[in-house]
Image (tube, rainbow, N blue to C red):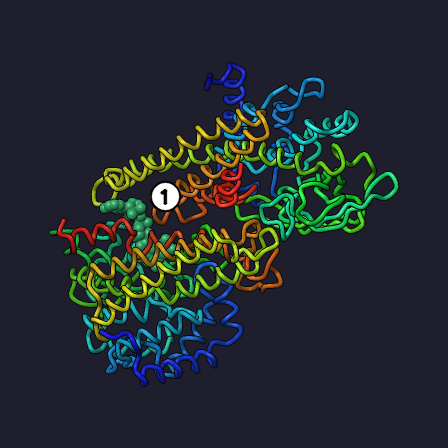
Amino acid sequence: MDLSYSAEDEAFRQEVRDFIEEAFTPDIRRECERSKNGYITKQSHETWQKRLYEKGWAAPNWPTEHGGAGFTPTQKFIFTQEMEAAGAPHTIAFGMTMVAPVIMKFGTEEQKAKYLPDILASNVWWCQGYSEPGSGSDLASLQMKAEDKGDHFLCNGTKIWTTMAQHADMIFCLVRTSNEGKRQQGISFLLIDMHTPGVTVSPLVTLDGPAEGAQEINQVFFEDVKVPKENLVGNLNEGWTCAKYLLEFERGNPYSGGLYRALDKVKKLAGDVVMDGQPLIEDEDFGAKLADLERQIMVMEATELRIFSEVSAGQNIGPGSSSMLKTRGSELQQEVSQLGMEAVGQYGLPFVEDTLASNNESDIGMAGVAPVTPRYFNYRKTSIYAGSNEIQRGIISKAVLGL
Amino acid sequence: MDFSFTEEQTLLRNMVQSFVQDNYDFDSRMKIVRSEEGMSREIWGHFAELGLLAAPFSEEMGGLDGGPIETMVIMEELGRGLVVEPYLPTIVLCGGILSRHASDAQKETHLPGIIAGEDVWALAYAEPQSRFNPADVLTSAKADGEGYVLNGTKAVVAAAPWASKLIVSARISGDQRDSDGLGLFIVDKSASGVATQDYPTVDGNRASEVTLENVSVGADALIGAAGNGLALLEEALDYGIGAVCAEAIGHMKCLNDATVEYCKTRKQFGVPIGSFQVLQHRMVDMFMEYEQSVSMTYMVNMKLTESEAERKKAAAGAKVQIGKSGRFVGQEAVQLHGGMGMTEELNVGHYFKRLTVIDTQFGNVDHHLKRFAAA
Ligand SMILES: Cc1cc2nc3c(=O)[nH]c(=O)nc-3n(C[C@H](O)[C@H](O)[C@H](O)COP(=O)(O)OP(=O)(O)OC[C@H]3O[C@@H](n4cnc5c(N)ncnc54)[C@H](O)[C@@H]3O)c2cc1C
């Protein structure tokens, strides 16, 4: 057991910092600071991801044969930690960390050649079509139909809560291809071009009050959409296997770096807010709250280090651990955002619709305040999406405790 | 000891309830919130016709002689409808200060316009640096002949965009946070030197930053004795707490009902999600939070007219409870609605947002816990 980093690791850390220094431009930085929901403009996401691509760091989780960064587990951890600590944009997960591993594992050679390079280079924007109005936690009940029409599938149905679908070129969908046997057995994993006739996207407005066109989630409708047969990934009616494989990637992310960063923002706000003539951060009770959250984040970090040190690149961490990280990570995200809102007090009330387009000068009361309360509202999502925390606890009780 | 409502109070509740049901469904509410002005003068006019704007004032002032319990009943029902029209700032806060402490001449000048629904009032007491301490006042009131000249900035003044009159706290003497030396002044929003920056707030209301630059007011603008403003203000804020507690239990009741109903009908895994024990217990906790909040809401509203010490302790205690319960109920209502709870389409999120703002209004949980300990 050893907590220290080697000299090579420290050199790598410096390289990451140098990269961030150069690529994390003031414009992108400002958007990240002012985002209500963790996303920035499409253009900025793409600019950022292409810079990573040029550096060879676009895909820390991919095996090197497909262009993965080839990090050691420790390097991967350092990379994520530095990115989070800087508050750099998150790589949009749908292509890079969700569909790509599925294509690598279950796809044909043609599919790998067709999709992976564009994902790596961020040429194509993906979104995730799992949930339906009637099928959220109970995903296997999904109804969107794909009928076999010889050379193509004919798709009808709807997907909901689809993150950033308004920007997407491609969607990976779980579709029903059979009603026989167990419900999980009639599901297939299908890649659909969003520009196909019959696909429409309609925005859903979340509690943070996004500006027009900047909504986080959407409903996607499919009306007689023709999808080429070659877009099926894995075997027909075996999409559930792909889905389960993917979900563990969706949940198996480190949180601590982002949490430290978010807590730093709260500290900064609490340093700017005055209470009875003193900075709020000097208040003993508020200080105790900050300290306890920081301590809990440290616990998270230690747990992550322990779990991630045990796996090597390209592997996922297994259902019990990923559910634990997702549950605790999301709860802490919510608590930090809540403390931020408490810190700003009355100036958490004014509402600015387009926080991305605006700047600190347009904030009411104090710099940087406009996204604080919307973010608190928005972050209620973290215990709902990617498998609700009730579902995660169910997984742990079943898979780990054997209950 | 009696926790029952009188027949008149029950009639009042029924009247407000059916008015809100008939005229203020969620769609109408959202139309009003998204309108240019952000409130409905028409609805406000109806409130006047129904006597709601007269409720807490004495009969000789043209009112209906109601007390905190009547206000509580009204606020709870307005809460159920998520009503944005400024009953709290105009009637409870400013109207309350005027009726309790203004001179007869001031009452005669100002109350008729309030009761008739012609004037909206806003209480401008907070300042950029004051956080939740109403004594922390930099706005100055310098004696000038018979009257005063006001200078300063007031923060997040609820309903100010709609108001024609403001009650402004300003320092006549003493240091920034002294409890002595404050005055409450009636200021015309159209007076020269008054400027506002208006904006929506996250809960669908409107507020303003108000700056006062050499605003001259007459002697008749001062309410009560010079220097005694803080006592009047603290009392008004406690009345405000009684009112928002009532509003909040209206929200919580709606959220709990909606959540139970949703969990009975929403099916996953072939069964209603309400059949999962973990959700059942969550809803039981929400129910218990609500019930305890109701108790404290009744308690604080009965104690508003008691001694200052009792009033303060009850107000602080109730505000802590409402803050905690409102947060729990709001968050869990969203959680149990899943993705649906995250959308603006459903009223659930809007109750949650208003409850969130109520925790901040008049001081949050931490603030009132300290106040409770000191009381
Ligand atoms: C902001 C956001 C972004 C999203 N992005 C995407 C996306 O890009 N693509 C996509 O496919 N989906 C996406 N989702 C959907 C998300 O995965 C679902 O919302 C989630 O799975 C919950 O489903 P539901 O909303 O239908 O709620 P339901 O499944 O109806 O759940 C309602 C409540 O019941 C509880 N519950 C359900 N079953 C059980 C049980 N067995 N035991 C105990 N409690 C239970 C839940 O925990 C929840 O509290 C997103 C959601 C949000 C909020």
Give x and y (percent) for residue A46: 43, 73
As drawn, B297 above or below B328:
above
User: Which residue is nearer to you in this view: A39 or B169?
Assistant: B169
From the viewer's perspective, is A196 left or right of A112?
Answer: right
The chain holding disc 1 is B
Crowdedness of circle 1 by 10 Å Cα count: few (<14), some, many (20+)?
Answer: many
The residue at 54%/20% (across/down) is B12
Residue drawn at (70%, 37%) of the image: B229
From the viewer's side, name the closer residue of B71 and B34: B71
Residue placed at 41% from the left, 37% from the top?
A: B255
* Residue B322 vs residue A4, the one in the foreground: A4
Q: Residue furthest left?
A: A181
Residue matched to label 1: B332
Q: Residue furthest top?
A: B7
The answer to whether A128 appears left or right of B105 in the picture is left
Residue A159 visible from this viewpoint: no
Q: Position of residue A317 (x, y in %)?
A: 21, 66
Residue B15 on image: x %, y %: 53, 22
Q: Regarding mark 1 in the picture, which secondary structure is present there?
A: helix
Question: Relative to the observer, which residue lies in front, A16 or A214?
Answer: A16
Up/down of A231 relative to A216, above or below = below
Q: How many marks?
A: 1
Which residue type carries mark 1? Glu
